[in-house]
Image (tube, rainbow, N blue to C red):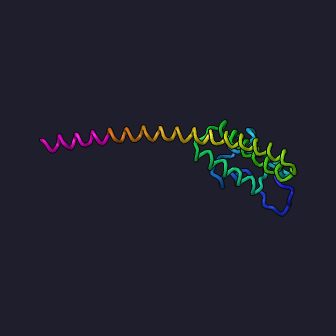
């Protein structure tokens, strides 16, 4: 994925082992657009740069942290790319009008990302509430058995 020849390249198997996913997962994520298409060696092997590995690690972290589906992960990754593009536009723009438009666009992108995060947080909260209720119920049953044993 790099044009620099002095940067270390990694074969797909090395990347998969390093980040803890299968080579099939990496290929599939490429197809989904989560990861750019890898450069190819003369033997047609996929080669990845350190930046690709870091991107995969970040995607896996987000997936695991938020429990995202692949569609949601794609959406979140696209939003991150959009934010990066907006940052680039900000650096290149000179007028206040252009920068105001960039800020408005960035607000929309971040609001969508927050929707995903808040939705996940709500589902986690509901699950935690369910577990707490089950635990409370089990403690009551345990106490009931203790009372029966003590009364016998």
The magenta segment: 138-152
User: Most extreme residue toward the bottom, as rendered?
Assistant: 6
Q: Locate residue 105: give its quadrant.
A: top right
Q: Is residue 42 above or below residue 32?
A: below
Q: Is residue 143 left or right of residue 135?
A: left
Give how far across and how far down residue 15 sits, in percent.
70, 53
Q: Is residue 52 above or below residue 112?
A: below
Residue at left offset 26%, top offset 42%: 142
Visible in this render: residue 20?
A: yes
Give how far across and how far down residue 46 sits, in percent.
78, 49
User: Most extreme residue toward the left, as rendered?
Assistant: 152
Towards the viewer: 13 or 143: 143
User: Most extreme residue toward the top, as rendered?
Assistant: 71
Main secondary structure of the magenta stretch? helix
Towards the viewer: 52 or 46: 52
Q: Is residue 151 above or below residue 52?
A: above
Q: Is residue 131 left or right of residue 43?
A: left
> Is 17 colored magenta in this rendering?
no
Give how far across and how far down residue 99 sits, in percent.
81, 47
Q: Locate residue 152: give its quadrant.
A: top left
User: Most extreme residue toward the front, as rendered?
Assistant: 96
Residue at left offset 75%, top offset 40%: 33
Q: Locate residue 113: give its quadrant.
A: top right
Total labels drawn = 0
Visible in this render: residue 39?
A: no
Residue at left offset 78%, top offset 61%: 8
Give how far across and how far down residue 80 sits, in percent.
72, 46
Residue at left offset 60%, top offset 42%: 117
């Amino acid at each position: 994925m790099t044009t620099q020849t002095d940067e270390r390249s990694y074969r797909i198997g090395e990347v998969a082992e390093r980040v803890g996913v299968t080579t099939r997962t990496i290929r599939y994520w490429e197809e989904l657009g989560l990861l750019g298409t890898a450069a190819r060696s003369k033997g047609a092997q996929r080669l990845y740069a350190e930046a690709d590995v870091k991107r995969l690690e970040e995607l896996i972290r987000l997936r695991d942290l938020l429990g995202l589906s692949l569609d949601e992960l794609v959406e979140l990754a696209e939003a991150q790319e959009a934010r990066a593009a907006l940052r680039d536009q900000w650096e290149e723009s000179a007028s206040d009008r252009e920068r105001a438009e960039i800020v408005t666009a960035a607000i929309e992108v971040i609001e969508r990302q927050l929707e995903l995060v808040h939705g996940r947080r709500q589902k986690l909260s509901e699950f935690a509430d369910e577990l707490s209720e089950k635990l409370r119920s089990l403690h009551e049953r345990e106490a009931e058995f203790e009372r029966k044993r003590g009364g016998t």
